[in-house]
Image (tube, rainbow, N blue to C red):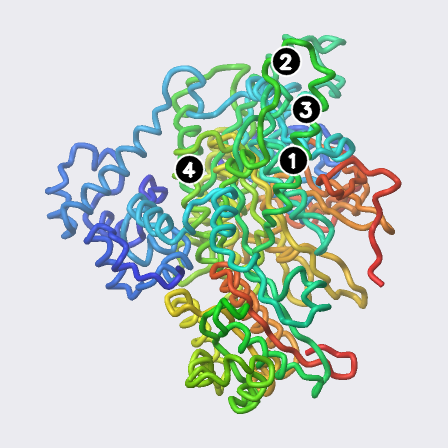
Amino acid sequence: MELARLPISASQRGKLISAGYTSFSSLSSLSPSTLAQDLKISDNEALEILRVVSQGSRLDKPDGSHAIVNGAQTAWDMLHEEESLKCITTSCVDLDDILGGGIKCKEVTEIGGVPGIGKTQLGIQLAVNVQIPVNYGGLGGKAIYIDTEGSFMLERALQIAEACIEDMSGNSDFLQKDFQSCQVKAQPKDFLQNIFYFRVCSYTEQIAMINYLDKFISEHKDVNVVIIDSVTFHFRQDFDDLALRTRLLSGMALKLMKLAKKFSLAVVLLNQVTTKHTEGSFQLTLALGDSWSHSCTNRVILYWNGDERYAYIDKSPSLRSASAPYSVTGKGIRTATSKCKRIKIM
Amino acid sequence: MANKLISEMGLPTSIANIFAARNITTAKEALSLTEFELMELLDVGMARVTSAVAHISEIVSPPTQTALSLMEQRVQNEYMAGHLPTRLKGLDEALGGGIPFGVLTELVGPPGIGKTQFCLKLSLLASLPASYGGLDGRVIYIDAESKFSSRRMIEIGSKSFPEIFHVEGMAKEMAGRILVLRPTSLSEFTESLQQIKISLLQNHVKLLVIDSMAALVTGEYDQGPTRQHSLGWHISFIKSIAEFSRIPIVVTNQWRAGVKL
Amino acid sequence: MELLEDVQQNKQVLSTGCEGIDMLLQGGLCVGHLTELVGPSSSGKTQICLKVASRVATRYMGGVVFIDTGNSFSPLRIAHFINQIPDTIFKEVEQNILEKVMSQILCHSVFDIFAMLDVVHQLEYSLRSQVQTGADQVRLLIVDSISSLITPILGGSGPHGRALMISAGFLLKKLAHEHNLAVVVTNHMVGGEGGILKPALGESWKSIPHVRLLLSRDPGSSICHMSILKHSYMASGRAARFMI
């Protein structure tokens, strides 16, 4: 029945049916006041229902070309679009390689790992790297950093920004002479100015923030990356109703997907890894594992291999499963060399 | 933020009334339901639910700022380069000036080693006027083990800062800046924390001491996940107080035979 | 009597492009049926959907509608699969062929159940009014994943979420049957009793798809394992291993 798919409440639907309205056409030429009288509801409510109905019936008749489904794209068009989408570099050559160039826009990428492996470091690096100007191969965009645990370190962001500027100036020596005119005059502080920082202290604030992002990003279209550090923290404690938690998390995941697609931005979700005890052995699994595991386009796991840091592509529709080493240096995330190893705490 | 009242958010009256009628009064209650659930519960169409939720979300979201403005704020407000000197030279050097602002510092050690004494000293230091190297502010001391002794503190004060403490009425004033709370249950503690967060800044509180964390939770629950759970929330909340108020927070913890509680 | 004739006439299958699966299903996906692919994260559900889409577009020159809820539709992968498929009309896949085939695959992103229902209704409308003819006829509809759209509305205090899920399921089956499409939906797994994974969407969903296929993949390997949970005329429990 046509009414079943309208985004109205069950009781509103019930009233429509009891009053004898079962199809869009029966409602098409009705005035709000007549409907209001019939259903014994307010004029406003009737107006709302009629609006939803007219939207629904309008969608039913697809317009002109690609008439099958409105708003759909052919795979061919998407292929070309994809080629022109830029990635955000991680500053580590090997990591960029397995990622197919870097963190992709229009996708939600989850990065999981144990504490200390470098998730926040990578988050901050991406918040800086997204700002690399277009002439240097970057996106020249801004970042949104949503901090749920207070992990963001200002001093570190400054350090990474400085190093990034240094690298860019270093590179301009290799570029053609034309680029000399647009020499990097950026200061590390400018980079900090392009990172919108939000500290959320509860799951309510986190949900509110994600809801608000739609409006915020519409007003700041130059944002190219949203980083959430870490995404499941506030949902791990203090939740009695696990079924509710699943509903809220899956709703949140869809909203993030929608943002990524709508604004062509990269959404990066940092997640903790916890130990799960099954069959007598401990397994490292992502926090909130089963109820959350399908909520991203790509998943990267950061792990220790002896004394070295590695990244592994755990899930991706287009990338092969592969591992790559990386390192965390004073300058930020960089390609691994033999010198960058884990410091053992005595 | 999560407990903000819907009635105070400036929603259109019609929808605000509907929320109230269904007993959804705080932002937390509204946002703990999915839009679909709200649609069914409030008996309105999805479009209205979505716009109400968008409105509520915008108000509850943390204020917009950039990393730069965050830094500038901190630089401006950071007094004494962001540290409370302990007067113990070696320790102050190691800590980069003293107990840091804006973060949670844990004092851990076996019973009897002097954690409470150290807390008393810090409380005193925070209350001293700036000219004596103090933070010139109030202190909130959460005394879970009833170990706080004002007499002992004045003793310490008289010994370490005779110049101040022999001045008429100074001892009383310093002592008066230290507010001691003795929560008798975990829920009392939780409530106090929430009150503290709200009233901290206007009351010029410059130091928060919690002595001890473990004592608050002992006896309330059996060992295991529930306790970890609850502590987790409290620690997270305390951290957020530290960050937002930029004061030092000191928490003591027991260390019994190599096992931390 | 009519029903039986109907069934016999409609017993067409669409090859999935994956030999192992085709053999398991005795030919491929049943046209007119709703097939569910269920498995844990990264077990190959999306890959199989992309492969089937490529196959149907190439071999049967049929239209494919791919409803994507996780921004996982990868045109690159589609192009890769098309280039792999041996029985294309010309020996070398030329740009025009690639373009022609890929233009038959339509992808639409949706992020809530109502949007999905709208898309399905539009599709139904255009099929009914026979807007397209002959070679372009839509043969395959994929929803990857339907569980991510339903999970936020399932559970909770009322039965409305479940009712909506059931009506969505019936709508898809009706579409498949009336317009000779194969419909494929993907579902994920959730933790059950004793920590063992089970398909999401609960008991009420179980009876809705005609065919339910369980997927799994050994970690680190590209070998997938598929077993039949439910089928209209085949025994459940049959399994196969294959590579994507």
Q: Are marks 3 and 4 on the same chain?
A: no
Q: Identify the amino acid type marked 2.
A: Phe
Give x and y (percent) for residue A211.
42, 46
Quadrant holding the C terminus of chain B: bottom right
Along the viewing direction, whichever of A136 and A180 lies nearer the viewer? A180
Q: Nearer the viewer, residue A343 or C86?
A: A343
Q: CA distance from mark 1 to mark 2?
A: 20 Å
Give SS at disc 3. Answer: helix
**Mark 2 or mark 3, which is nearer the start of the sequence?**
3
Give the residue at mark 2.
A179
Q: Is residue A7 visible?
A: yes
Q: Which residue lies at the image location 26% right of the left edge and 58% below the top edge?
A: B8
Q: Are marks 2 and 4 in contact (CB under 8 Å)?
A: no
> In the rendered image, which quarter is residue A299 located in?
top right
Q: Nearer the viewer, residue A271 or B162?
A: B162
The residue type indicated by label 3 comes to: Ser
Q: What whole-number distance in Å separates the C-alpha atoms at marks 3 and 4?
A: 48 Å
Crowding at dot 3, Cα within 10 Å, few <14 / some 14-19 / many 20+, comes out as some
Which residue is identified by label 1?
Answer: A162
Residue that label 4 marks: C115
Mark earlier in primary sequence (1, 2): 1
Q: Which residue is mark 3?
A: A169
| Relative side of A83 to B78, left or right | right
Tell me the amino acid under the disc marked 4. Answer: Ala
In this rendering, the label closer to the viewer, 4 or 1: 1
Tell me where residue B55 appears, x and y as whole percent: 32, 48
Amino acid type, residue under disc 1 in the picture:
Glu
In percent of the image, x 70 and y 69: which residue is there?
B89
